[in-house]
């Protein structure tokens, strides 16, 4: 147990020595100019990206509006031969007085005699 | 705090002069921390600039100037971690150097030659880097912040945004692994 404590203390001392052993670097003369150049460069990039994104959003909105307007214009159906509804078309195709549907069923047909 | 809240608020409002002052106030500390975290002196300035670059573009997200320092530490840790992840080639240190370093440490107590001290410092750095090789990159950074940078658990809680107990467990496990490596190096010295 005491050995472990001893090693702990040694390790703490080593960490302390490490802090002192590491050099305290001084910034070079170019530190601030380079930093501002990097900031400007990033800003320019962000600005052009934002401008591009804005242009894209504007174009998308304009396209949506144009598509909406186009879809809302009533179609000219004068040229089409069909004007009725689906039910009307169905009724026309199978009129109730069609013999195949409403005609009497003969027993002969069913029994085969 | 190395700067007052008013200066931070001005920097938040995109005041270049205020931002310059903030950078000048924290530059040395950040450079020192990064030096210890990445252990590659040639890239320290580049990583420090990345920290301040991130600071510039995220300063408006800082809600209260009171948490500025832990927040700056978080940016520093993230930038260092990103750098290390990119590098992925951590220097391999030989564990056998440890014993030699400990001998040198004892020798240095007697002598005070500058050259000898420099040699000793180098050995200490190598020893600690070697020991910290026993833990993951993330745990290495956490241990550095706690043991070398001297951040308290409360401060680390703000930096990592995790609760104190989780941090304690993680620190304990990381430290145990380092201690194990330290003990193994000691044994090697004893037998060697």
Image (spheres, rainbow, N blue to C red):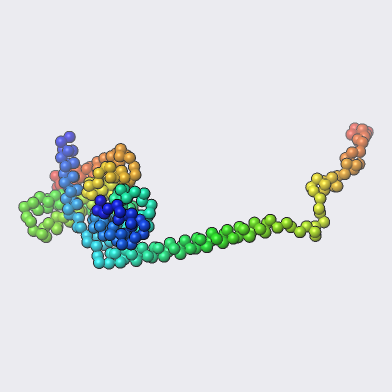
Apparent side of residue A101 relative to residue A4 in the rendered image (left or right) = right
Residue B131 seen in the figure? no
Vertical position of residue B154 compared to residue A68: above or below: above
- Going 30% across and 54% down the picture, which residue do you hit? B6
Vertical position of residue B10 compared to residue B131: above or below: below
Camera-side residue: B32 or B140? Answer: B32
- Going 18% across and 45% down the picture, which residue do you hit? A12
Q: Quadrant of residue B183?
A: top left
Spot occupied by residue B97 in the image (x, y as percentages of width and height)? 18, 52
Spot occupied by residue B114 in the image (x, y as percentages of width and height)? 10, 59
- Going 59% across and 60% down the picture, which residue do you hit? A62
Vertical position of residue B175 compared to residue B73: above or below: above
- Going 14% across and 44% down the picture, which residue do you hit? B190
Camera-side residue: B20 or A3? Answer: B20
Spot occupied by residue A105 in the image (x, y as percentages of width and height)? 91, 35
Spot occupied by residue A57 in the image (x, y as percentages of width and height)? 54, 59
Apparent side of residue A111 relative to residue A12 in the rendered image (left or right) = right
């Amino acid at each position: 147990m005491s050995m472990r404590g001893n090693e702990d203390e040694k390790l703490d001392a080593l960490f302390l020595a490490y802090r002192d052993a590491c050099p305290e670097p001084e910034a070079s003369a170019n530190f601030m100019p380079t930093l501002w150049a990097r900031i400007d460069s990033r800003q320019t990039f962000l600005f052009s990206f934002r401008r591009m994104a804005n242009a894209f959003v504007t174009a998308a909105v304009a396209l949506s509006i144009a598509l909406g307007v186009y879809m809302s214009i009533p179609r000219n159906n004068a040229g089409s031969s069909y004007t009725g509804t689906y039910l009307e078309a169905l009724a026309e195709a199978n009129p109730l007085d069609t013999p195949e549907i409403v005609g009497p069923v003969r027993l002969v047909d069913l029994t085969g005699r | 705090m190395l700067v007052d809240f008013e200066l931070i608020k001005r920097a938040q409002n995109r005041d270049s002069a205020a931002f310059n002052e903030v950078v000048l106030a924290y530059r040395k500390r950040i450079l020192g921390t990064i030096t210890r975290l990445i252990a590659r002196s040639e890239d320290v300035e580049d990583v420090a600039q990345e920290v301040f670059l991130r600071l510039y573009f995220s300063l408006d997200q800082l809600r209260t100037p009171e948490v500025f320092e832990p927040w700056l530490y978080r940016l520093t840790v993230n930038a260092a971690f990103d750098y290390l992840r990119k590098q992925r080639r951590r220097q391999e240190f030989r564990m056998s150097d440890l014993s030699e370093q400990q001998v040198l440490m004892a020798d240095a107590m007697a002598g005070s030659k500058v050259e000898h001290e420099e040699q000793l410092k180098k050995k200490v750095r190598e020893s600690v880097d070697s020991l910290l090789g026993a833990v993951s990159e993330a745990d290495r950074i956490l241990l550095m912040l706690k043991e070398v940078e001297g951040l308290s658990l409360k401060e680390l809680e703000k930096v990592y945004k995790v609760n104190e107990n989780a941090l304690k467990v993680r620190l304990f496990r990381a430290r145990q692994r380092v201690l194990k490596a330290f003990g193994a190096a000691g044994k090697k010295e004893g037998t060697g």
